[in-house]
Amino acid sequence: MRLLELFAGAGGAHLGLRAAGFEAVACVERDSDACATLRAGGCDVVIEADVRTVDLTPWAGVDALWASFPCQCWSTAGARKGGRDEDRNGWPWTVRAVDEVGPAWLIWENVPGLAQHSSAAHKERYPDPLDCPGCYLEHVILPDMRERFAHVAIFRLNAADFGVPQHRRRLFGIAGPVPVVPPRATHGPGMFRRPWVAARVAFDGPCPVAMKWNDARLDGGRNSTQNPTQERSRGLGEPSQTVGGCDSLILRGPGGKRCVTLKECARLQGMHDHPWHGDRKSCHRQIGNAVPPKLAEVVGRAVLQAARGET
């Protein structure tokens, strides 16, 4: 199936979709470092351009369109300004792309916060209903999808449930000519699942002085008393918390602490030996924004199975 990929980033989704069986005809990304990483990772159809201005008509009639559209205005880690923050809401640009190329399938990925309704305090500050992420999903995104496709589905998936050593929850929207069956978890609690993959697989270097791996834990690097919404610290025998776009994950133990390295963050994403380009800040941003390839692969396989009439 021929695929046009928007907001391609450093190639996490590209790797997974290629493994699923998609053939990318173009990967559009405006960040130069991410484009360099994409090319070094084997993608030869990189279009370094802004989705808002690039002419997409050369790919009219493509089979599928993937969009990891900007999500900062929906993320619980940010100010959550909602749909009013047009510079960081990439959904309108995605709709324009759909109308330009007319794909049979649309697949998008975003943060779970997009499906959450705002608190009373947020609504008081931003009274427009479409400033609420959940309302924007219900009253803008879903109607836009239903207007253009026969079948629409929303899935909430956790990368750890598919063998990634990280709890990374993401929202997926899939629209097309036939229904899609949600991917079934292969890892985690349950009689018929394999155990979650432990974060320990990402750490193969020497342990800090006097810190024993069995006692080490991962946390977000902030004071949990002052930041009650911070994810709890996790031992290396379970999947890590979500890898973010900042250099913030800390490995702590009785004998000391250190930052988690770029290589280790990439491994927590399931992106071993990926050729990152740019300075440290840029590489952390690329890693934190990436879709774990395995997660993109299982979503891609679900779409291909539906397209072939398999269940």
Image (cartoon, rainbow, N blue to C red):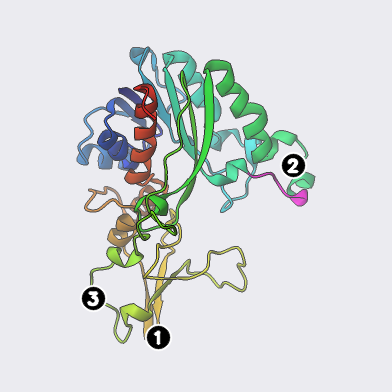
- Mark 2 vs 3, N-terminal side: 2
> Is 72 drawn above or below residue 108 in the view shown?
below
- Which quadrant of the figure contains the C terminus? top left
Which residue was labeled with disc 2? 126
Amino acid tagged 1: Pro
* Magenta region: 116-121
Query: Whole-percent x and y of residue 91?
Result: 54, 30
- Res. 254 mark: 1
* Structural distance between the alpha carbons of marks 1 and 2: 45 Å
- The residue to which callout 3 is attached is 206
Bin the neighbour count of mark 2 within 10 Å (Cα to Cα): few under 14, some 14-19, many 20 and up.
some
**Could you give the CA–CA distance between mark 2 and mark 3, rounded to whole angstroms?**
49 Å
Q: Position of residue 68 (x, y in %)?
A: 44, 36
Which mark, residue 157? none
Residue at image x 31%, y 35%?
Answer: 17
Q: Main secondary structure of the magenta part?
A: loop
Give the residue type that dot 2 points to.
Tyr
Please identify, in this view, whether the residue under mark 2 or under mark 3 is nearer the observer. 3
